Amino acid sequence: MTITITAFERSPDGGRGLARDTRVRWALEEVRQPYEVRLVSFRALKEPAHLALHPFGQIPTYEEGDLALFETGAIVFHIAERHAGLLPNADPNARARAITWMFAAVNTVEPPILELANAKLLEGDKPWSKERQHLVEDRVRSRMEQLSRRLGDADWLDGAFSAGDLMMVSVLLRLRSSSILDEYPNLAAYVARGEARPAYKRAFDAQLALYQTSR
Ligand SMILES: N[C@@H](CCC(=O)N[C@@H](CS)C(=O)NCC(=O)O)C(=O)O
């Protein structure tokens, strides 16, 4: 059955891989599943046809036969459940821990990182923005500190690479534009390891090619 995902017709990041379709592409590449991409304009995101797929009018969505999903955590989890390669199979506890890391990525680590991005993008011109930005950065640092301590000198969060790492690296990539990631060399190296995976490279190149040709 054909898998179709949605992505921005024009990505605000111009193909730097920060739009959330990249993590879904990465998961599909890891498990070697072909997929098609339907591009959606900002206007179409909020129109009934897309809202029927995604109640919050966002990308990405995932369609496969009768199934339509939104939320990258749920989409990557679905892919990992259906295809071997992203979740441990032999050890149920290891599988549960990998799933826990997926939740930690979207529930605990992504929110302060998004808050920082929003503080810069949407509030940068406000008279109070500098003062608040320090507070927001400190909240990010506090999470990075904890994550860095847990990762230590391991390659991945819990044994072999899993969907938990895929989600965590995807979330951390948004910190690239600030110097905060480099304050934690083991996390910077962790992100670099994720980006070096052939499946990530294929996913990144696919989205970049799209924005280079659609301009
Ligand atoms: N929690 C959602 C967030 C989805 C999301 O924020 N998508 C962004 C693109 S990366 C979007 O569509 N933004 C446009 C909008 O919200 O209007 C997920 O992980 O799928």
Image: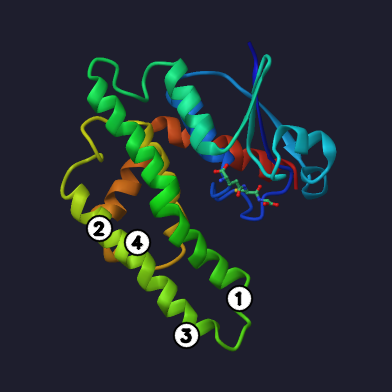
- Residue 200 in view of the camera: yes
Q: Amino acid at mark 3?
A: Glu
**Farthest left residue?**
153
Q: Amino acid at mark 1?
A: Glu
Q: Nearer the viewer, residue 132 or 10?
A: 132
Q: Residue at x 63, y 71 (%)?
A: 122
Classify mark 2: helix, strand or loop: helix
**Of marks 2 and 4, which one's residue comes earlier in the chain?**
2
Residues at marks 2 and 4, CA–CA distance in whole angstroms: 13 Å
- Estimate the x, y position of residue 46 in percent, counting from the top left: 79, 46
Q: Nearer the viewer, mark 4 or mark 1?
A: 1
- Estimate the x, y position of residue 97 in percent, counting from the top left: 28, 33
Q: Is mark 2 within 8 Å of ligand 1?
A: no
Q: Nearer the viewer, mark 2 or mark 4?
A: 2
Q: Is mark 3 within 8 Å of ligand 1?
A: no
Label 2 sits on residue: 146
Please report contact status of discs 4 and 1: CB closer than 8 Å, yes or no.
no
Residues at marks 2 and 1, CA–CA distance in whole angstroms: 27 Å
Please report contact status of discs 1 and 3: CB closer than 8 Å, yes or no.
no
Vertical order, 134 against 168 (above or below): below
**Of marks 2 and 3, which one's residue comes earlier in the chain?**
3
Mark number for residue 123?
Answer: 1
Label count reads 4
User: Counting other residues with Cα less than 10 Å from the Cα at mark 1, is it few (<14), some (14-19), or many (20 or more)?
Assistant: some
Please report contact status of discs 3 and 4: CB closer than 8 Å, yes or no.
no
Q: Residue at x 48, y 33 (%)?
A: 26
**Of marks 4 and 1, which one's residue comes earlier in the chain?**
1
Q: Nearer the viewer, residue 66 or 177?
A: 66
Label 3 sits on residue: 131
Mark number for residue 181?
Answer: 4
- Estimate the x, y position of residue 145 in percent, counting from the top left: 25, 62
